[in-house]
Amino acid sequence: MEIKVRDAVPGDIQDILDIEASSFEFPWSERMFMNQLQLRSIAAVLVAHSGNAVTGYSVVWFEGEDSHILNIAVSSEYRRRGVAGKLVDEIIRRSRERECVRLYLEVRASNLKARDFYVGKGFRIRGIIEGYYQENGEDALLLELSLI
């Protein structure tokens, strides 16, 4: 299975929403994703795909010297097949292209699989943000990757 990553287009939104709904208890709305597509100067919405099948997606913002992963998910049938790794590799490439020096994200403190994945990609835990997730008050871990 060959996984490729490209910029999302409006026609990808339903596939993204399906993955989002099956991945998160509190999913983003269609409007939230559509808004991100409109912010091309500061944001990228990426989709991973195998043939015509959207296998995952990510949303990243570029903020001066920092890039920030806002959202990333992989379709359940494509997990553990390198999809998330391809998305993160593309985010790193684009971040360096924009001369960002840090890439960061927040991850639920309870999400051990995600934390282990990011640490395996070279991210370091920089701190805890208490009560970060408003819907249930869960803490987030702040993870950072140096790009220089």
Image (cartoon, rainbow, N blue to C red):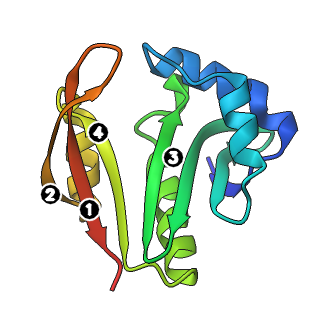
Q: What is the CA distance from the residue labelled 4 to the residue labelled 3?
A: 18 Å
Between discs 3 and 1, the one toward the N terminus: 3
Disc 3 designates what residue? 83
- Which amino acid, mark 1? Glu
Q: Are marks 1 and 2 in contact (CB under 8 Å)?
A: yes
Between discs 1 and 2, the one toward the N terminus: 2
Label disc, if present, on residue 144 of the rendered structure? 1
Q: Position of residue 59 (x, y in %)?
A: 57, 47
- Place residue 79 in its image quadrant: top left
Q: Residue at x 52, y 34 (%)?
A: 74
Q: What is the CA distance from the residue labelled 4 to the residue labelled 1?
A: 11 Å
- Which amino acid, mark 4? Val
Q: What is the CA distance from the residue labelled 3 to the residue labelled 1?
A: 20 Å
Disc 2 designates what residue? 126
Q: Are marks 4 and 3 in contact (CB under 8 Å)?
A: no
Between discs 4 and 3, the one toward the N terminus: 3
- Element type at mark 1: strand
- Element type at mark 4: strand
- Element type at mark 2: strand
For label 2, the crowd category at 10 Å Cα-Cα, with few meaning under 14, some 14 to 19 and many 20 or more, is few
Q: Are marks 2 and 4 in contact (CB under 8 Å)?
A: no
For label 1, the crowd category at 10 Å Cα-Cα, with few meaning under 14, some 14 to 19 and many 20 or more, is many
144 lies above or below 71 = below
